[in-house]
């Protein structure tokens, strides 16, 4: 009681707002988890139970036994992390080049990159498919990785460019005059300062790749190469809407990602802010 | 340390040997890609078992079976064909089979049909895949649409006879509608609206396209059908257009609706799984023969019978035929059929007479559901989606595009949900369909 | 830096340029080229038709309808995201116990796959067995179950789901910027006797101006071309007609009518609208240099 009294009305209001926010953002997840642990007959019970009465793991058992969930999960991990690595390397090099070197056409390249930002997957999916087919990499993870790299690159270069711009060149020059090579200067001076930005771009790429639906839908035909999004969507399209299994699948996809992001969110907000805001 | 090093070298050698071995083994294997639409876990398992047995008999062939959702299948097949890498065999809607055959993209399945024995296959089944003298598709299993109703509730209201006409049906729907029970539920998604449009048009003695391929959407039959549909919505859940096919089943076994017009045998499995145990039988959920419209005299239903198709340009078509031959052997086919026994009406007479088949518990329990399907099939009362007359399959290869375009669905929505006048909605659909056919070069009027 | 390093600079930018040209610029150009053809989506049949596709679409009532739905959808989702996003960011900028936890939670919706978000909401909004209808009926707001994915409410549901899914992006961006506003600005204002609201209007908003400029631009582009969220909600269900936005219509023309020419034309028109929007937007709001 005493503790509550010591809270000012302003703080109470803040806690109230925060609570509303948490409910708005997280209640659907609560319901997903609750459904995932309910036996079949409880799922359709009316009035619904908030918590499962006879909680069961049967939904998860079905998910692992009757679907290729683990394969989809593995594929998602492979594709998303590869896309992150490839994009980060290309984008960092590109952004560094755009901020630290002068050459013919630099500005034009910068505006081209900004321009390609407007491209949405739906606008290029057909020609993209034709191209991928011509190269002969349709129905491979490589095609997906390239697609995500291409899609994230403009945003990532742009964000990192703002980051590199905010790092004074003087610092690098000082390192260079101290006798360090350029590579060393980059590793010891630029990278640590740009790290939040690099992490932010990595996360952006990861989310896009992890969540993508349309590229997988179009580019991948084999079941064993599908990623989670399409795998789970197909559970819904299957001949039975097994809400328990779908929700347990949704939970399995979501929880690892959320745990990961909750840990690094401080970094995330800092990186996102300092970079994206610059424009 | 020493030991570890040695161990590593040996392990490395063994590994590389295994890799080389696997590499050559795979190189020698012929891969057969099989796409099917039975995504439910039981059927997938059955197919996996059949594949495993087949591969054991044919170590040089590897079968990659993949279950695809209905909605994706057409797009996937087209994309595969365009990429020059179609699967060896795939399921598909009969109209898709017709369209692809028309473009010369399929290989004949005559060898398979002869192997099974042409006389062993139900006559109705043969009409789906036969173009000219050749079979370009062979149905994997048939399942007709069924009018499912709650027998207990009908009894309470003193209804013992099924509806003969649409009028009767509306009366029954009205009688069964109560405060917490809708009279009837039908799916509101594109495929099923197309299915129902075709089926009701046939039941009303109408046609959808004439011999010049001109749409007949503004005719009397269509108007009557839309009127019926609109009347029906009075007894349906108000948000029926949001219900997929599976949700209508949920309405049924969840005791929210008393009848479903587009039921299928698959529903029996769902009822067994989800309805309260004492209700999961034909005393509560039974089927009636469907009614006909004012312009028709005979009932009509749709038949869900997707043919296997064999693709030109695929790598190993001969091996694929071998697999299909194996698939239709009684033991294998039975295992497949038994995964959804009430929905999968076997295409071979031999299996329908097979003792093990008849002993399947579900088949004994839901016999009435299968009898109605057999009645429809034997009396040629069922047609595939959007097919009014069997010759449509060969002569109207554009039905696949009509189905995909959603023109008919939009028309039904305008009439039932937006209160657009019949004349206006049908005229708009007519115009859109005419444009589609003109652009596709099918117009002969 | 040194001119001698020009080569290094070009070498470093080459992979980016190559990927962007090969995988973005080329497909888009090919798409524009396709818009002048009548082409089957998968078969090699194609005829040059000039501007006929564009003329056809301008006369096509479905096109105008999808433009209308698309505009309603993007306008409402963007405004709601911005408003809710700013409010949430302001709350999360305050210090209170468990703040980091709440910050983490608020990002949830943006992190989960769209497919999961849609399935989850479909389950919540299910007319017969869904939790939302149960609530509404229990507290007496609704007598009959509301058909959230039916004709009358599907646009509302779609907007709700989209705002829920994407507002964390605004929170992230705004919160990041809030953290870089020097606290002395507020201290000075407090000394001057400015109230909380006035501090928000006179200090916070101007500081957020640049980030909001970018966020609104990005979200507009992304919402206007949003496909998966919209498509997955119905996947061809009956009420699909009432949320058939431009991207969905383009997809349908290409993959269901098999008219790749018309599908590409729709994509080009969509692109044109975005460019026009961006040009006007820049002219109206951009003051500072350098992007």
Image: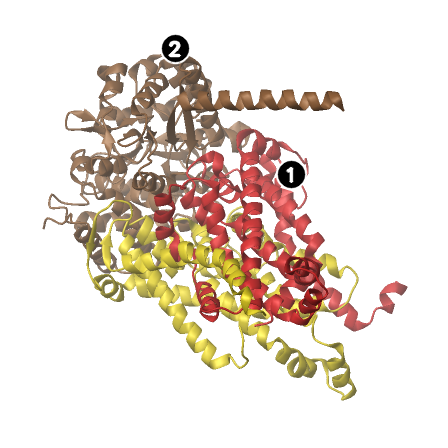
Chain colours: A red, B brown, C yellow
**10 Å crowding of disc 2: few (<14), some (14-19), many (20+):** few
Image position of B374 with respect to C164: above or below: above
Callout 2 secondary element = helix
Residue A53 image point, x, y percent: 68, 38
**Residue B355 shows which numbered tag?**
2
- Position of B392 with respect to C144 (left or right) is left
Instruction: Report whether residue B177 is seen.
Output: no
The answer to which of C182 and B420 lies nearer the viewer is C182
**Residue A118 shows which numbered tag?**
none
- Using the image, name the chain to which the residue with label 1 belongs: A
Q: Are marks 2 and 1 on the same chain?
A: no
Residue situated furthest right in the rendering: A2
- Using the image, name the chain to which the residue with label 2 belongs: B
- Position of B177 with respect to C185 (left or right) is left
Callout 1 secondary element = loop
Residue situated furthest bottom in the rendering: C192
Q: Name the residue tied to disc 1.
A: A37
């Amino acid at each position: 009681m005493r503790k509550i009294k010591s809270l000012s009305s302003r703080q109470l209001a803040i806690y109230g707002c925060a609570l509303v926010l948490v409910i708005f953002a997280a209640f659907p997840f609560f319901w997903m988890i609750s459904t995932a642990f309910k036996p079949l007959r409880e799922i359709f019970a009316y009035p619904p139970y908030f918590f499962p009465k006879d909680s069961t793991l049967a939904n998860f058992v079905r998910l692992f036994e009757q679907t290729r969930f683990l394969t989809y999960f593995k594929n998602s991990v492979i594709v998303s992390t590869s896309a992150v690595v490839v994009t980060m390397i290309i984008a960092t090099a590109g952004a560094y080049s755009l901020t630290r070197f002068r050459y013919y056409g630099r500005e034009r390249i910068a505006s081209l990159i900004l321009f390609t930002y407007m491209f949405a997957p739906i606008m290029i999916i057909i020609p993209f498919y034709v191209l991928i087919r011509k190269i002969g990499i349709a129905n491979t993870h490589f095609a997906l990785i390239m697609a995500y790299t291409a899609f994230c690159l403009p945003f990532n270069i742009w964000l990192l460019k703002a980051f590199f711009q905010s790092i004074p060149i003087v610092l690098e020059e000082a390192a260079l005059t101290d006798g360090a090579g350029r590579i060393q200067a980059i590793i010891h001076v630029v990278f640590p300062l740009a790290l939040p930005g690099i992490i932010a771009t990595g996360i952006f790429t990861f989310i896009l790749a992890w969540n993508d639906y349309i590229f997988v839908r179009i580019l991948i035909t084999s079941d064993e190469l599908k990623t989670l999004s399409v795998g789970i969507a197909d559970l819904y399209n299957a001949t039975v809407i097994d809400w328990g299994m779908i929700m347990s699948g949704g939970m399995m996809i979501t929880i690892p990602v959320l745990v990961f992001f909750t840990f690094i969110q401080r970094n995330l907000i800092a990186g996102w802010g300092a970079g994206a805001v610059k424009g | 340390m020493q030991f570890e090093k040695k161990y590593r070298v040996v392990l490395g050698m063994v590994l590389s040997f295994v890799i080389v071995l696997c590499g050559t083994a795979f190189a020698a294997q012929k891969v057969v890609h099989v796409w099917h639409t039975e995504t439910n876990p039981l059927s997938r398992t059955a197919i996996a078992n059949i594949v495993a047995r087949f591969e054991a008999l044919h170590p040089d062939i590897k079968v990659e079976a993949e279950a695809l959702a209905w909605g994706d299948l057409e797009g996937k097949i087209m994309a595969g064909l365009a990429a020059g890498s179609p699967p060896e065999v795939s399921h598909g809607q009969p109209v898709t089979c017709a369209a692809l055959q028309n473009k010369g993209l399929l290989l004949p399945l005559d060898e398979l049909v002869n192997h099974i024995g042409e006389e062993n296959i139900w006559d109705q089944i043969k009409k789906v895949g036969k173009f000219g003298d050749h079979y370009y598709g062979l149905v994997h299993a048939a399942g007709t649409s069924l009018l499912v109703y709650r027998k207990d509730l009908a009894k309470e209201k003193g209804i013992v006879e099924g509806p003969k006409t649409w009028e009767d049906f509306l009366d029954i729907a009205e009688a069964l509608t109560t405060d917490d029970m809708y009279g009837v539920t039908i799916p509101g998604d594109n495929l099923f609206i197309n299915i129902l449009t075709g089926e009701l048009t046939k039941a009303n003695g109408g046609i959808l396209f004439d011999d010049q391929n001109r749409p007949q959407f503004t005719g009397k039959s269509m108007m009557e059908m839309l009127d019926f549909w609109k009347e029906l919505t009075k007894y349906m859940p108000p948000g029926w257009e949001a219900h997929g096919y599976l949700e209508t089943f949920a309405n049924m076994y969840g005791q929210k609706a008393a009848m479903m017009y587009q039921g299928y045998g698959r529903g029996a499995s769902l009822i067994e799984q989800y309805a309260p145990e004492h209700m999961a039988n034909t005393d509560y959920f039974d089927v009636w023969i469907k009614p006909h419209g004012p312009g028709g005299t005979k009932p009509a239903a749709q038949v869900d019978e997707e043919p296997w198709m064999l693709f030109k340009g695929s790598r190993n078509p001969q091996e694929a035929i071998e697999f299909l031959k194996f698939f239709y052997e009684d033991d294998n086919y039975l295992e497949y059929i038994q995964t959804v026994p009430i929905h999968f009406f076997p295409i071979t007479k031999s299996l329908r007479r097979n003792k093990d088949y008849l002993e399947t518990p579900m088949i004994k329990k839901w016999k009435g559901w299968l009898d109605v399907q057999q009645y429809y099939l034997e009396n040629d009362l069922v047609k595939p989606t959007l097919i009014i007359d069997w010759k449509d399959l060969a002569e109207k290869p554009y039905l696949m595009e009509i189905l995909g375009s959603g023109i008919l669905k939009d028309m039904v929505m305008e009439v039932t949900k937006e209160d657009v006048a019949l004349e206006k909605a049908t005229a708009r659909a007519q115009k859109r369909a005419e444009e589609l056919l003109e652009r596709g070069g099918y117009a002969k009027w | 830096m040194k001119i001698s390093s020009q080569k290094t600079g070009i070498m470093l930018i080459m992979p980016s340029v190559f990927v962007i040209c090969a995988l973005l610029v080329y497909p888009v150009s090919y798409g524009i080229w396709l818009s002048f053809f009548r082409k089957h989506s998968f078969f090699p049949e194609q005829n040059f038709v000039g501007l006929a596709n564009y003329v056809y679409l301008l006369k096509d009532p479905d096109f105008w309808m999808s433009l209308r739905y698309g505009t309603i959808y993007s306008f409402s989702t963007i405004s709601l995201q911005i408003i809710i996003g700013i409010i949430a960011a302001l709350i999360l900028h305050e210090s209170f116990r468990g703040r980091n936890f709440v910050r983490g939670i608020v990002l949830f919706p943006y992190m989960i796959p769209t497919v999961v978000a849609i399935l989850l909401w479909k389950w919540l909004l299910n007319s017969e067995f869904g939790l939302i209808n149960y609530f509404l009926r229990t507290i007496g707001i609704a007598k009959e179950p509301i058909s959230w994915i039916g004709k009358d409410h599907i646009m509302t549901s779609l907007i709700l789901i989209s705002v829920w899914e994407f507002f964390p992006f605004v929170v992230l961006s705004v919160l990041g910027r809030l953290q870089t506003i020097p606290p002395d600005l507020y201290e000075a204002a407090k000394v001057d006797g400015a109230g909380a609201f006035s501090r928000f209007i006179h200090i916070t908003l101007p500081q957020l101006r640049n980030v909001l400029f970018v966020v609104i631009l990005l979200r507009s582009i992304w919402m206007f071309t949003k496909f998966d969220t919209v498509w997955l909600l119905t996947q061809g269900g009956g009420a699909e007609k009432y949320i058939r936005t431009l991207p969905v219509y383009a997809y349908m023309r290409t993959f269901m009518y098999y008219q790749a020419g018309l599908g590409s034309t729709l994509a080009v028109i969509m692109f044109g609208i975005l460019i026009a929007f961006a040009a006007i937007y820049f002219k109206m709001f951009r003051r500072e240099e350098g992007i």
